[in-house]
Image (cartoon, rainbow, N blue to C red):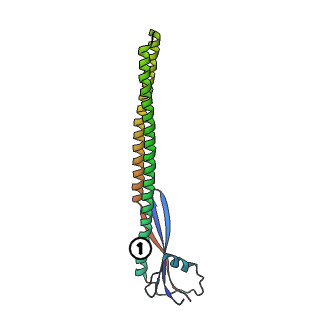
Amino acid sequence: MGQEGSLRLSLLTIKALDQVEDYPIVVALADNGQPLNVEQSSRLLRLPVWDWHTVNTPPASEPLASITMCRQEAILQSISQRNAAFFEAEANKLEGWAEDLKVGLAREIKELDRQIREARRAATAAPTRQEKLDAQKHVKSLEAHRNTRRRALFDAQDDIDNHHEQLIADIEGKLGQKTTLQELFSLRWKII
């Protein structure tokens, strides 16, 4: 009670990757030089106004600008940490998916190799020429399937690389963000 000071409301706008995020920044400073924290500054805006009149002397702008810049940096740091956590989570998901895919395909190829060995043994042990021919056709069919699965493994690795490149491009886009700070209003306050 009895304190007075200055308040500024600014709007921080961040544009990145076709997304726009707005953050209001409320800063207040008592005339004794004591800055109010974020909660106290915001609460000043919710208090009822008993006496409203235009003041010819503008609020002290340099200290308010300094506090605004500090809060802006804190918001940008928070967004940077959020983006880093997002990148880490997406990279981990991508790595997990890639590993599962590679292990599954490698296991399938190994099983096909085993089936091919058994089919070759069966072909050499076949008693008639027709059975040998049928067994050789089965071996060729298994080999073709194994080659298809090998190509699928390489294609999957290329797909993983493409996903990783896209993830990096998204992060670069977020790093290339455009920020604007617009002062909405400044005022003098007094609590009575």
* Residue 3 in sight in this render: yes
Relative height, residue 182 to residue 132 (above, below):
below
The kind of residue on which mark 1 rests is Cys
Residue 34, quarter of the rendered image: bottom left
Residue 84 percent across, percent down from the top left: 42, 58
Of residues 152 and 146, the one drawn nearer to the viewer in this rendering: 146
Residue matched to label 1: 70
Residue 139, quarter of the rendered image: top left
The residue shown at (45%, 51%) is: 90
Relative height, residue 170 to residue 57 (above, below):
above
Q: How many marks?
A: 1
How many residues crowd around disc 1 within 10 Å: few (fewer than 14), some, or many (20 or more)? Answer: few
Of residues 133 and 55, the one drawn nearer to the viewer in this rendering: 133
The residue shown at (44%, 58%) is: 85
Residue found at the very far top of the displayed protein: 128
Quadrant showing the N terminus: bottom right
Residue 100 percent across, percent down from the top left: 45, 41
Residue 64 percent across, percent down from the top left: 43, 79
Of residues 168 and 62, the one drawn nearer to the viewer in this rendering: 168
The residue shown at (44%, 20%) is: 119
* Residue 136 in sight in this render: no
Element at label 1: helix
